[in-house]
């Protein structure tokens, strides 16, 4: 996947509007796949990206959070933590599949398919330049490393 074109997608945001990766052409994009809203580590992860958002925006980088949660759950999640970046709902799990970011059995629920904790950095030309995958959903990425990498692409 690294060095290849990022698979395009269109998903619903918290307002049930379509958002496409193509909408971010010319920008560095951090796709932050997360297993589920209101699940502790996911809360910490999204808040960490929010804390770094101004630095990322200054370097022409945007964050997009993606989970299999509904737009309504994501809207409550964004509201609770005052998240100022898009949270998208991959309810059909097509984007999770396209980015090889699926996790099966979250919370011990056999057969339940969610997103794993995966971070993908896409450059301005739409090429995947960095990919980090959690060993398990309880592991967080190195936020400073991801922010520095994204800033280096600007």
Image (cartoon, helix red, strand yellow):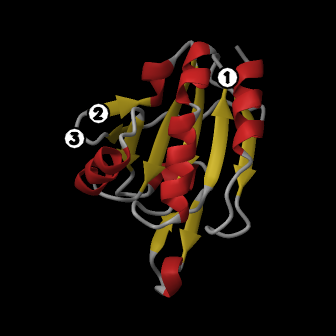
Foreground residue among 150 and 24: 150
On the picture, is 124 further left or further right than 81? Answer: right
Q: Are the residues at dot 2 and dot 3 in contact (C-beta closer than 8 Å)? A: no
CA gap between label 3 and label 1 equals 26 Å
Q: Is residue 106 above or below residue 29?
A: below
N-terminal of the pair, mark 2 or mark 1, is 2
**Image quadrant assignment for residue 134:** bottom right
Whether residue 34 is visible, yes or no, is: no
Q: Is residue 105 above or below residue 80?
A: below
Q: What number is the disc on residue 18?
A: 2
On the picture, is 136 further left or further right than 53? Answer: right
Q: What number is the disc on residue 123?
A: 1
List the residue tagged with mark 3: 16
Q: What number is the disc on residue 154?
A: none
> Which residue is at 54% across, 29% downward?
53
Q: Are the residues at dot 3 and dot 1 in contact (C-beta closer than 8 Å)? A: no
Residue 6, percent across and down?
A: 61, 33
Foreground residue among 21 and 88: 88
Residue 60, percent across and down?
A: 58, 15
CA gap between label 2 and label 3 equals 7 Å
CA gap between label 2 and label 1 equals 22 Å
- In the rendered view of the protein, which quadrant contains the N terminus? top right
Q: Is residue 91 above or below residue 87?
A: below
On the picture, is 39 further left or further right than 1? Answer: left
Whether residue 112 is visible, yes or no, is: yes
> Which residue is at 58% across, 62% downward?
116
Mark 3 falls on what kind of element? loop
- In the rendered view of the protein, which quadrant contains the C terminus? top right
């Amino acid at each position: 996947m690294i060095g290849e074109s990022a698979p395009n997608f269109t998903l619903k945001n918290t307002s049930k509007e379509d958002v496409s990766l193509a909408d971010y052409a010319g920008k560095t994009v951090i796709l932050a796949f997360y297993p589920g809203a209101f699940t502790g580590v996911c809360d910490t992860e999204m808040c960490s990206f929010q804390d770094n958002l101004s630095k990322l925006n200054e370097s022409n980088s945007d964050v997009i959070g993606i989970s299999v949660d509904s737009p309504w759950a994501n809207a409550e999640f964004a509201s609770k933590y005052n998240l100022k970046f898009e949270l998208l709902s991959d309810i059909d799990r097509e984007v999770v599949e396209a980015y090889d970011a699926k996790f099966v059995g979250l919370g011990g629920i056999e057969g339940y398919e969610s997103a794993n904790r995966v971070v993908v950095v896409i450059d301005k030309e739409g090429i995947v330049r960095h990919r980090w995958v959690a060993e398990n959903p309880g592991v967080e990425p190195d936020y400073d490393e991801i922010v520095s990498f994204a800033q280096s692409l600007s």
